[in-house]
Image (cartoon, rainbow, N blue to C red):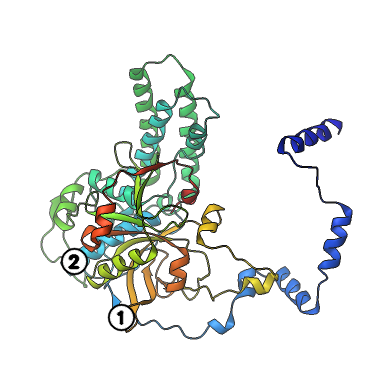
Amino acid sequence: MKKIFLSMTLLCGTLGVSAQGISQEMLTRFSQANKITGSERAIKNALAAGPVSGLALNQDNQVEQNTFFSNSVPSKGITDQKSSGRCWLFTGMNVLRAKMIKEQNLPTGMEFSQNYLFFYDQLEKANLFLQAIIDTRKKPMDDQTVMWLFHNPLSDGGTFTGVADLVAKYGIVPKGVMPETYTSNNTSQFTTFLKRKLREDALALRADTKATDKTLQAQKEKYLSEIYHMLTLGLGTPVTEFSWAPKDSDGRYVYPPKKYTPRSFYEEFINLDLQNDYIMLMNDPTREYWKTYEIQYDRHTYDGHNWLYLNVPMQDIKEAAIASIKDSTMMYFSCDVSKYLDRSRGISDLANYDYDAIFGVHFGMDKAQRIQSFDSGSTHAMTLKAVDLDEDGKPLKWKVENSWGSSSGFQGHIIMTDEWFDNYMFRLVINKKYASDKVLKASQQKPTLLPCWDPMFSAEE
């Protein structure tokens, strides 16, 4: 006991503060200042029996939702990522399939195989991690970058940059060619074992401090082969050639099937330069606007691109989004999805829940403060497809196509008020043809490199 007391004394001395713990007198003051009233007793009883969100639900905001949108991109069918963190991949594929459905006049149900690209995503991330371990092997284990690498060897989350790099390297295939498996739909446990194996491999790569680069590369290839084997067991073996043709609404082939490789299929039906013709716009009020930023080690492939974005005011994001929607082009969009979301109705509105009234305190942080304190960040990617404009062309609300299945939210969608959009929307990927001259010019500047542990990127999509 004496050792613990001495340690606390030294700690307080180091911090330069006096030892101010919670005293009995302080507890007495708390108790006297917080007597439970009759109405608060009802709240206390309700909180003991159910979730805060149910109690805080604002009944005055439960009126029938206006679902009219002045401008909307047509789409067919809602996808479902099931119990996986692949929203970024579903969103990227949904943006692409909308183009193909429109141009080929395909029926509802056309999807690309998320499982196909997910296989290569996990393999590429494994290589990225192991090579980063080799690159940093001379740094101590308590180096911040090394600790971050071991904490984040691999995940099922990602960004549009990953979609662009993976598609450019591996192409795409229809879902029927490489369908989902239980493991791809339920990634958590499988990913845990991948990470465990990679951490073990990383320790082995760091162990021999005198190993040559040639030896390390051979060792890394052996480990990647084992990861490849695990992936084939959980996800299947990626297809390299297949036959395909579109079907009509009755399931009949429109024309005889022909052979494709994943890359030739992409070139024939999509043929977009995702790596060069698109810009990721960010709204992060904690950093200077009109600057580009790059995130260290935040990429999907070692030979690919770090996460790169241009930070701009919300008004500039909205202008680009409206231009894209008016031209019937969907966009990759991400936000802090859980905040003030009435999931049953699919409505994101700051008026949905009155948490201040429930707890008798005021939650007053603004967007910048929520980011700085790790209270908010982008957690989910979806496909932005509609905006409702007033007579002056100002947005009233927005709609995204989600990947939680057709029974989720509003017919598989989420409708967001413009005020909610301002507070919890973070990223939007646009084709450069919808960007203003100012955005295009600013996107060409040399980016500022941010560390991989930056607060804005602590929560993955």
Sequence order check: which comes first, mark 1 or mark 2?
1
Numbered mark located on residue 380 in the image: none
Query: In terms of depth relative to the viewer, which is nearer, 304 or 31?
Result: 31
For the point 23% across and 63% down, which residue is it? 434
Provide residue 373's location: percent of width, then percent of height.
57, 53
Q: Which quadrant holds residue 36? A: bottom right
For the point 41% across and 83% down, which residue is it? 66
Query: In terms of depth relative to the viewer, which is nearer, 178 or 214?
Result: 214
Residue 25: tell me if it is visible.
Answer: yes
Mark 1 residue crowding within 10 angstroms, few (<14) / some (14–19) / many (20+): some
Identity of the amino acid at label 2?
Lys
Q: Is residue 297 left or right of residue 265?
A: right
Provide residue 267's location: percent of width, then percent of height.
15, 52
Quarter in which the N terminus is drawn = top right
Provide residue 357's location: percent of width, then percent of height.
66, 74
Measured in 3D between alpha carbons, the distance from the residue under mark 1 to the one under mark 2, in whole angstroms, is 32 Å
Q: Which quadrant holds residue 46? A: bottom right
Residue 299: tell me if it is visible.
Answer: no
Numbered mark located on residue 70 in the image: 1
Which type of secondary structure does the marked residue at label 2 adopt? loop
Numbered mark located on residue 247 in the image: 2
